[in-house]
Amino acid sequence: MKLYNLRNKLLPLFISPVLLISSCEKKEDKQAEDNNADGKSLSVDTEQPKKTFRLPYYNEAFFTPHWHSPDAPELASFHKIPAFELTNQQGASVTSKSLRGDIYIVNFFFTSCPGICPAVIRNMQIVEAAYPQDPNLSLLSFSVTPDKDDVETLSKYATKMKITSPSWHLLTGNRKKIYNLGRNAYFIEEDLGVKKTDDEFLHTENLVLIDGNQHIRGIYNGMNKTSIKQLIKDIKVLKTEDTPEVNSH
């Protein structure tokens, strides 16, 4: 019997929780109606907020929030994204070390995907547009069919989808390593409690937010406009954290 997919049901409503640290006056955002299925920008205020909120940390696939300050000693042994090295659409090497200190957003896709993937990519472009030319924000799109999505194919896909930012990496490489990152590092899938083999296809609309220390700070439904708006806000919150010096892996 197929395990009831709890997270898939809740994820459209899953809003990365934000902890109120001190009392303050919260300004209401005036947002446009969610009618941008064609990739138009959302109306979201991205001005720097007061340092009164923080995002939780996550360390497993059930995404139970853990509330720590950025300098908490518990974070020294808390779950981090492990070291990796893959190749982007320009043929350049992208490593966890090269991303050190950057906030980045992760999704998993494949270039021949006809529906979900292009829609998620367009919503990621909305997030990117909210922080134009931000030197400390990157986007990582991992191919789940790396045997087919070589550098040339990824380059053509980037042109087709109008992905031009040097901070947006479409990644290919060893399939086993990519799947291990997706399932055991980013916890990107929705089938909680279901053990999967490397042969089973990885396909999801989820986005994951990673901080400059390689910690997971949020998960979002990449097809849901409300969730995308929350991701934009959460990046803003994350950028205000007084993060200690980032250590290399």
Image (tube, rainbow, N blue to C red):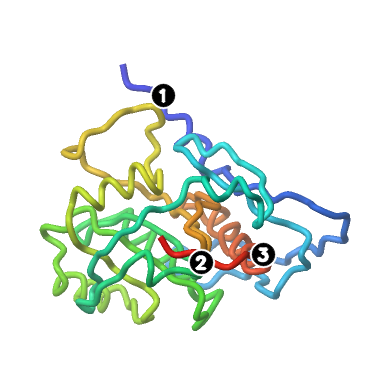
Q: Amino acid at mark 1?
A: Tyr
Q: Nearer the viewer, residue 63 or 101?
A: 101
Q: Are marks 3 and 2 in contact (CB under 8 Å)?
A: no
Give the residue number, with chain letter if any, for mark 2. 103
Mark 3 or 1, which is nearer the eye?
3
Q: Residue at x 30, y 29 (%)?
A: 195
Label 1 or label 2, whichever lies nearer to me, is: 2
Q: Is residue 34 above or below residue 126?
A: above
- In which quarter of the view is residue 112 placed? bottom left
Question: Which residue carries the number 3 mark?
Answer: 241
Assess whether mark 1 and mark 3 are in contact (beta carbons under 8 angstroms): no
Circle 2 SS class: strand
Could you tell me how far apart the alpha carbons at marks 3 and 1 are, in whole angstroms?
Answer: 37 Å
Q: Which residue is mark 1?
A: 4
Report helix, strand or loop for mark 3. loop
Q: Residues within 10 Å of mark 3 (few under 14, many from 20)?
A: some
Taking the image as shown, residue 204 lies to the left or right of residue 201, namely right
Q: Which badge, 3 or 2, comes first in the chain's sequence?
A: 2
